[in-house]
Image (cartoon, rainbow, N blue to C red):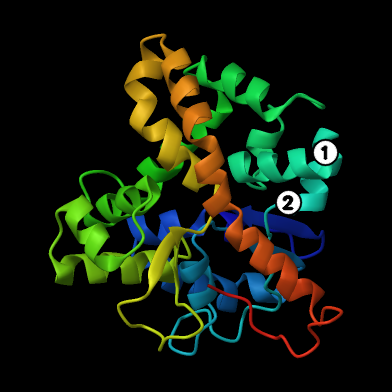
Amino acid sequence: MIARTASPDAPVVVVLDELPYLMGSDPAFESVLQRVWDHTLQGRPVMLVVVGSDLATMEALSSYDRPLYGRVRLERVVLPLNLAEVAGMLGLTAPDAVDALLTVGGFPRVLLSWPRGMSRQEFVRQELTDPTSALVVIGERMLAAEFPAPDTARAAIEAVGHGERSFSALSNRSGMSATSLHRALTLLRSKRVVEGEDPLSTARGGRATRYRITDPYLRFWLRFIGPALADIERGRGDLAVARTEESWPSYRGRAVEPLVRQSLERLAPLPGLEAARDFGG
């Protein structure tokens, strides 16, 4: 349709959203798009923008063995809002902004539901007592779209999100064999949903690797909201709120570590620690 309607004279911008879903539903889509571009659109004033949330799939589009190799002119990763942007958007002090980031990440859709100046406790209470709130619904939709249950990757995500960190603990929690769990974690790391971190004093890729959910919002959702969906949907969100507040201090202490490390890496070299270049466990 685009090829038939695109004018040879008037500039046109075409946006294809969630390209990985199109490619998943039609394996030949990439090749079709390449042919249409080469034979029709390339010679016209057309800007084609493709968007997708699966970074691994999007980055692979321009690789050497793919139909669109050499045709991608500009690539951009749209990052979540950072801590300073979250603080400015919500009108919060630095400590409160850290808590906000650990709850909703830098996801604008969820942040838009957070009234300016509202505390984390008030926001969590507001959202968890409404089964249709953004904080509750978006995480569920993200997982259902990317990793429908039952699925080995979904089981691995839920085990990591529960708080398990080592490979053996994840295997016990998920009930998966070592081979299946290794495959699932490899997939999740390639999609940047899960990160594996090695203590600086150990060899990489050994038994000391500790796994965590990359996105703070998804990490919060898996830890506190996913297991409480039944309570929230039957009007007992107060139970989910109580469990969240009871566990928040210990959860925050671990969840803030990646944020601290990333901040130190950006600030390095630090006064008094000029030689420090690596920050880890």
Check disc 2 and give the amino acid type. Answer: Leu
Circle nearer the N terminus (1, 2):
2
Picture residue at 64% right of the left edge, 44% below the top? 107
Residue 113 position in % (x across, y down): 68, 27
The residue indicated by pointer 2 is: 81
Residue 190 position in % (x across, y down): 42, 71
Picture residue at 52% right of the left edge, 66% below the top? 55
- The secondary structure type at the circle numbered 2 is loop
Task: Check disc 2: other Cα within 10 Å, few if <14, some if 14-19, many if 20+.
Answer: some
Residue 141 position in % (x across, y down): 43, 37
Q: Is residue 217 visible?
A: no
Q: In this rendered view, identify the residue nearer to me: 140 or 52.
A: 140
Check disc 1 and give the amino acid type. Answer: Met
Find the residue positioned furthest to the top. Answer: 235
Which quarter of the figure has residue 44? bottom right
The residue indicated by pointer 1 is: 89
Q: Are the two marked residues, 1 and 2, in contact with CB atoms closer than 8 angstroms?
A: yes
Q: In this rendered view, identify the residue nearer to me: 141 or 97.
A: 97
Residue 203 position in % (x across, y down): 40, 89
Picture residue at 34% right of the left edge, 54% below the top? 164
Marking on residue 208: none
- The secondary structure type at the circle numbered 1 is helix
Picture residue at 76% right of the left edge, 43% below the top? 95
Judge whether 98 appears above or below 34 on screen.
above
Cα distance between the residues tagged 1 and 2: 10 Å
Horizontally, residue 24 falls left or right of residue 119, namely left
